[in-house]
Each structure stands twice: as C-alpha cells, then as structure tokens.
Amino acid sequence: RLQPVLMGELDPTQVAAIAEALTRAADQRLCVILDLHNYGGYRDRPIGSDEVPEAAFIDLWQRVAQRFPDESRLALGLMNEPKNLPVSRWAGLAQATVTALRQAGSHHLILVAGGGWSGVHSWFKAAAGDVSNAQALAGLADPLGRTVLEAHQYADFDSSGTHTDCR
C-alpha cells in the first residue's frame, strides 16, 4: 500500500495516515516503529527475485526516511519476519539497506528482524541449506550505532503463537 509501484512515489493517502499517526504519537510523547509486514516479499514475489530487485526495497526505505526525516519519534523496522527469504540473503539486504540509509543521511533508529520468523528459540539454529540468524547478523554494521536486532518469541509449546496455552 505504501509504494504501489516498485521504485515509484509513495502513496499520498498512506503517507497522510502515517503523518497523522506520527502527529498523534508526538502529542502523547510516544515513539512509533514503522515496519513492513509482507514477510520478505512484494505482491507475493520475494525480494531479490527478477520481479522485485533488492534495489526496490532499499528505494522504499530511502523514500520513507526522506519523507519522515525526524528520527526523534520514528524508528524504521525494515521487515517483520522475513520468512520468504533465505536468512543469509536477508542479512545482506538488511546491511545494504542500513548502509544506504546512512549514506542518504538518515539518523533513524533501525530495527533489523532476524530472518525467517525471527524466533529467539531458533536464533542459533541454521535453516536448511543456510546459516542461523546468529551467524548471518553477527557482523551487521552501522556507523551511527543506531541499529538493533529484533527477535520474537511466542510462549506456546511450539513457539508459533497459535495456541492458547503458554509454557
């Protein structure tokens, strides 16, 4: 919704809604995390595919950071649970995005979720044919030191968040 066409302008209606949310949050002295919830894809195509080049993901975040430059109340969460990408590819894309944002002058706090479902329970486990989040994100660098890793943990028996009983 925010960028209906890859590498295109941000949608004015969505920008206005974000701006309103930021204004309301500022009035209450709250901070906002703006993140993407499309699991590492764009319209059912994985980022890094021929249809959705990694440059399009970076372009989106550069546009967002430029449109909302006040980092005092806005953090950028690059991607919630990027399960549709190999962990190693996600880590490389996250690093490229952090680097591009810093080179463009962004001082926002940046949240980088672990690959897959970003689970704490599996942080040190390598995905089939890939590496673990611990390995892939160990070298994540930010010249400003304003990037943090994000992990999730559901308290049910299989860490899925789909059951009502907690461990």
Image: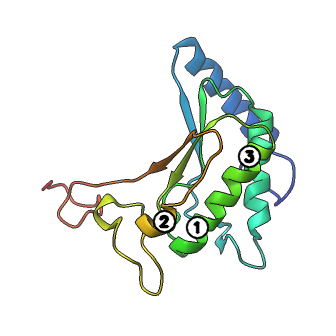
- The residue identified by callout 2 is 115
Which residue is at a point 48% across and 81% down the rendered structure image? 130
Q: Residue at x 85, y 58 (%)?
A: 7
Whether residues under marks 1 and 2 lie with C-beta atoms below 8 angstroms apart, the answer is yes
Task: Give the residue number, with chain letter if any, for mark 3.
Answer: 101
Query: In this view of the protein, which residue sits in the foreground, 119 or 142?
Result: 142
Residue at the right extreme, as displayed:
8
Q: Please give the label number shown on residue 90.
A: 1
Q: Amino acid at mark 1?
A: Trp
The mark that comes first in sequence, 3 or 2, is 3
Nearer the observer, 19 or 55: 55
User: In what element is the residue under mark 3?
Assistant: helix
Can you see residue 12? Answer: yes
Residue 70 vs 15, above or below: the answer is above
Q: Earlier in the sequence, mark 1 or mark 2?
A: 1
| Image spot of residue 141 (x, y percent) | 60, 52
Residue 150: horizontal and vertical position, in percent? 45, 50
Q: Which residue is depicted at the point 53% across and 64% down?
A: 82
Dot 2 surroundings within 10 Å: few (below 14), some, or many (20 or more)?
many
Task: Estimate the spatial distance between the alpha carbons at disc 1 and disc 3, rounded to whole Å.
Answer: 16 Å
